[in-house]
């Protein structure tokens, strides 16, 4: 009798300890890192608000939910995953590039690097952004990549953090009559107290292609 | 001895076992009814139908005035801002905002139709209007789904049954195309119209023939403008299978249907544009939308009645100075909406006109707080309480501060709420407006009037308001007729839009442009859950709500009144106004391309792989 009363707590303790792990899984340990590129060079896009996403699918499961990858403003993305084969696509209609949605097969094992090549409508190069007094000046080259694409609008953007895009900013002005080639724009920023009081200032330019849901940007330039 | 006990216990048990069959536990549930119980009783049938009317005002069914959640829905667009507490960081639109998806509701209605058609307690003549009402509500549910997500599975009258072992794939219906969905709603409505009564219903709470016709007209107009404006975008929103997107060649026939249905309602004469007070157009417009007695305007409304069925709108939004309980000033209109109301003697009628706040390098001085507003479209008074306007017989004082002269320069002085200066002049009024993170303060300079209940105790927590929520008004029939006439180019657009404008008390339009129609809908139907859907179907939403914080259309703005206190100055006692972005809404409204259609919930797709995802999903 005495032995039994000693055994029972031991058994219970064992049950409690060993029961952990039955319905728990280890967290994924492999890492997928990559960049959205055109001809090997990463694209500058909007990196806030989960605006640009890629989707990963894995075959052979009940659920069809995608694993969402959020693209940063330098075109980089990363995810913690289990080892295995994944299918990567861009999200439908999302991004400043041609909506092709071709599948890229990704074999994740340990740390895996991948680059997703897309065809942007436009690219921005040679940006020169400055603020002098109450004017913001920007000159840059809009390179037409897709010959049929048209420019909907160009944007001059100022931000007080290094995250600068069409939503995350303290100043934005849109210009609708812009065509590809070398562009020079200036905007009046007088009367904008946020800009006047900003301790740090970052500038960026962006171009929306007609019909695209996101803009392509220049790299972020530190102004102050 | 032991044996005796056992025998006794056994006998006792046997006795209990036998007598317990008296059935005192064996009662029929009083909350779960069988089909037989319901459909053998005419009163029960009616109360089941009433349940369906009550189930369509949840927050996913669009804007409403029912409770805090639904009133917050008003502030997701550009007409209304939140005053309650600190700033609302809202900018983008959720993927499930106003996403109606209620197949439980549709199934329940189909069960009801099955029972109704089989019952013998009602004559066929009595069944017809009930069937019409149930089918109308079902069409309304499909319409709400369609405007949010495009084509969804149409299940008809079928009540699906599942038994274990059955092939589940037979129940997995694919999505209908968007055009099929609108066609179904339109054909249902025109069939239902023949079943329903033609007379007005008490407080317009139940559907009649004209309600069905209005839904037919509205659905046709939505389908027509999708076919028209979606295809004019540089990258039309559509799916390969047509679940989203209607081909452009269908626009003409949809516009024709919309015009025909709207004209039928107008010509019936059952409802008329309410114009009972020709000498007080402002009051008249308020009564046309917000007073039930002698109303000739409202065709279908969610009615409320105390006790039991009341709304919070009046309670949470009443001006602080008029509050009857703790709550007040939770939301209010923005300047974006208020300046849309044109001047009565506008040089170019039918468009937005900004307020003049500066002139000759200084402030523009107005004779009274209400002066810049009183010269505008009378519908402004009927929709919005502006500074100096009257509510329930007492003035609503809105004063941010004073404009005083210091060393020959005008400067503004602001105090605490309900504060006075040294000479006893009011500095800042009890209502505000004021920049603050606290609640119960006006922040834009405007309060609601439309749907604000003037009944005593309507703003108390204990009672609540009986204000209705109109879903269709006769003026919508005129606006649908005007818009479809404009698109069809039949030359009759001015006739319809000017009927609405004449009732409102503004100048008629000689020619009608698309911008005139957008403008008219915005001022006529302010806070009535039209604008969000209008902007979507016109494909204007992504252009106007562009997320640019420097854009004065995309971001909420305010207009604050200051009283001039400068004894000896000719402007002493006058009023000036200062316009600015609204502190409570630091971010501009940002409607992205993906927001034209809600995303489908992945649970639905996992359960039914035949459902196609929406664009951008």
Image (spheres, rainbow, N blue to C red):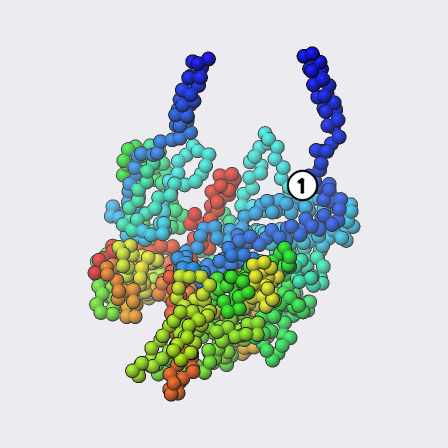
Q: Which residue is mark 1?
A: B32
Q: Quadrant of residue B314?
A: bottom right
- Within 10 Å of disc 1 (Cα), the crowding (few <14, some 14-19, many 20+) is few
Dot 1 lies on which element? Answer: loop
Q: Is residue B305 above or below residue A117?
A: below
Position in image of residue B432 (x %, y %): 44, 69
Decide if residue B314 is in sight here. Answer: no
Position in image of residue A194 (x %, y %): 29, 64
Position in image of residue A203 (x %, y %): 25, 60
Q: Is residue B475 above or below residue A55?
A: below
Q: Residue at x 61, y 70 (%)?
A: B287
- Determine the chain carrying the residue at label 1: B
Q: Residue at x 32, y 65 (%)?
A: A173
Question: Closest to the observer: B517 or B302?
Answer: B302
Q: Is residue B590 above or below residue B417?
A: above
User: Is residue A170 toward the left or the right of residue B197 in the image?
Assistant: left
User: Is residue B84 toward the left or the right of residue B362 in the image?
Assistant: right
Question: Closest to the observer: B90 or B593?
Answer: B90
Farthest residue in the front direction?
Answer: B1
Position in image of residue B303 (x %, y %): 63, 59
Q: Residue at x 35, y 75 (%)?
A: B412
Badge count = 1
Decide if residue B400 is in sight here. Answer: yes
Question: Closest to the observer: B549 or B29?
Answer: B29
Question: Closest to the observer: B406 or B390?
Answer: B406
Q: Residue at x 34, y 36 (%)?
A: A81
- Report the quarter where the N terminus of chain B lies: top right
């Amino acid at each position: 009798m005495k032995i039994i009363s000693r055994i029972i707590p031991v058994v219970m303790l064992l049950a409690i300890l060993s029961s952990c792990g039955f319905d728990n899984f280890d967290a994924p340990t492999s890492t997928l890192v990559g960049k959205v590129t055109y001809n090997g060079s990463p694209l500058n896009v909007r990196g806030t608000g989960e605006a640009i996403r890629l989707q990963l699918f894995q075959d052979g499961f009940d659920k069809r939910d995608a694993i969402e990858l959020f693209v940063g403003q330098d075109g980089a993305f990363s995810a913690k995953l289990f080892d295995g084969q994944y299918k990567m696509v861009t999200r439908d209609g999302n991004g400043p590039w041609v909506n092709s949605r071709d599948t890229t097969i990704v074999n994740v094992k340990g740390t895996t690097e991948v680059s997703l090549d897309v065809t942007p409508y436009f690219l921005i190069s040679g940006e020169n952004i400055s603020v002098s007094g109450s004017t913001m000046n920007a000159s840059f080259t809009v390179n037409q990549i897709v010959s049929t694409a048209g420019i909907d609008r160009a944007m001059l953007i100022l931000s007080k953090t290094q995250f600068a895009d069409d939503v995350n900013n303290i100043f934005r002005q849109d210009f609708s009559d812009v065509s590809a080639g070398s562009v020079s724009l200036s905007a009046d920023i007088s009367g904008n107290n946020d800009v006047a009081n900003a301790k740090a200032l970052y500038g960026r330019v962006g171009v929306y292609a007609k019909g695209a849901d996101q803009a392509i940007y220049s790299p972020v330039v530190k102004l102050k | 001895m032991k044996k005796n006990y056992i025998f006794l216990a056994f006998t006792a048990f046997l006795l209990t076992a036998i007598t317990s069959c008296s059935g005192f536990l064996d009662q029929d549930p009083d909350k779960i009814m069988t089909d037989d119980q319901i459909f053998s009783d005419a009163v029960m049938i009616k109360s089941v139908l009433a349940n369906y009317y009550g189930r369509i005002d949840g927050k996913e069914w669009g804007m409403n005035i029912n409770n805090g959640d639904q009133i917050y829905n008003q502030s997701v667009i550009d007409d209304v801002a939140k005053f309650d507490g600190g700033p609302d960081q809202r900018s983008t639109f959720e993927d499930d905002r106003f996403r109606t998806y209620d197949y439980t509701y549709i199934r329940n209605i189909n069960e009801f139709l099955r029972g109704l058609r089989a019952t013998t307690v009602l004559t066929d003549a009595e069944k017809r209007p009930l069937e019409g009402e149930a089918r109308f509500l079902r069409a309304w549910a499909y319409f709400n789904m369609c405007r949010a997500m495009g084509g969804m599975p149409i299940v008809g009258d079928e009540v699906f049954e599942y038994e274990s072992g059955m092939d589940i794939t037979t129940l997995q219906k694919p999505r209908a195309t968007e055009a099929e969905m609108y066609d179904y709603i339109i054909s249902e409505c025109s069939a239902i119209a023949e079943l329903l009564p033609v007379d007005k219903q008490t407080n317009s709470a139940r559907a009649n023939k004209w309600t069905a016709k209005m839904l037919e007209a509205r659905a046709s107009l939505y389908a027509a403008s999708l076919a028209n404006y979606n295809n004019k975008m540089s990258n039309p929103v559509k799916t390969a299978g047509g679940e989203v997107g209607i081909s452009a060649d269908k626009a003409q026939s949809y516009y024709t249907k919309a015009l025909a249905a709207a004209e039928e309602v107008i010509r019936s004469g059952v409802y008329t544009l309410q114009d009972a007070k020709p000498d007080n157009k402002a009051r008249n417009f308020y009564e046309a939308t917000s007073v039930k007695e002698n109303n000739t305007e409202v065709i279908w409304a969610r009615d409320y009645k105390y006790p039991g069925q009341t709304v919070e709108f009046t309670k949470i939004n009443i001006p602080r100075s008029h509050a009857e309980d703790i709550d007040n000033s939770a939301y209010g209109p923005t300047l974006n909406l208020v300046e849309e109301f044109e001047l009565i003697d506008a040089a170019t009628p039918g468009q937005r006109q900004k307020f003049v706040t500066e002139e000759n390098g200084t402030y523009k001085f107005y004779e009274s707080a209400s002066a810049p507003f009183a010269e505008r479209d009378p519908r402004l008074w009927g929709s919005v309480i502006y500074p100096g306007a009257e509510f329930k017989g007492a003035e609503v004082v809105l004063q941010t501060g004073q404009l005083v002269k210091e060393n020959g320069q005008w400067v503004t002085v602001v105090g605490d709420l309900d504060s006075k200066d040294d000479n006893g002049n009011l500095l800042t009024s009890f209502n505000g407006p004021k920049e603050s993170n606290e609640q119960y303060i006006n922040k834009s300079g405007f309060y609601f009037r439309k749907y604000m209940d003037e009944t005593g105790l309507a703003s108390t927590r204990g009672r609540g308001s009986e204000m209705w929520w109109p879903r269709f008004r006769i003026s919508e029939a005129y606006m649908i007729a005007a818009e479809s006439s404009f698109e069809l180019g039949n030359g009759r657009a001015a006739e319809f839009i000017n009927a609405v404008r004449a009732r409102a008390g503004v100048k008629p339009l000689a020619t009608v442009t698309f911008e005139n129609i957008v403008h008219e809908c915005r001022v006529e139907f302010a806070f009535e859950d039209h604008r969000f859907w209008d902007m979507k179907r016109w494909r204007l939403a992504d252009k106007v709500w562009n997320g640019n914080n420097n854009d004065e259309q995309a971001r909420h703005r305010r207009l604050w009144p200051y009283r001039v206190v400068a004894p000896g100055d000719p402007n002493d006692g006058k009023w000036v106004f200062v316009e600015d972005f609204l502190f409570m809404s630091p971010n501009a409204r940002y409607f992205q391309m993906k927001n034209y259609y809600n995303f489908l919930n992945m649970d639905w797709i996992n359960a039914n792989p035949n459902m196609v995802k929406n664009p951008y999903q």
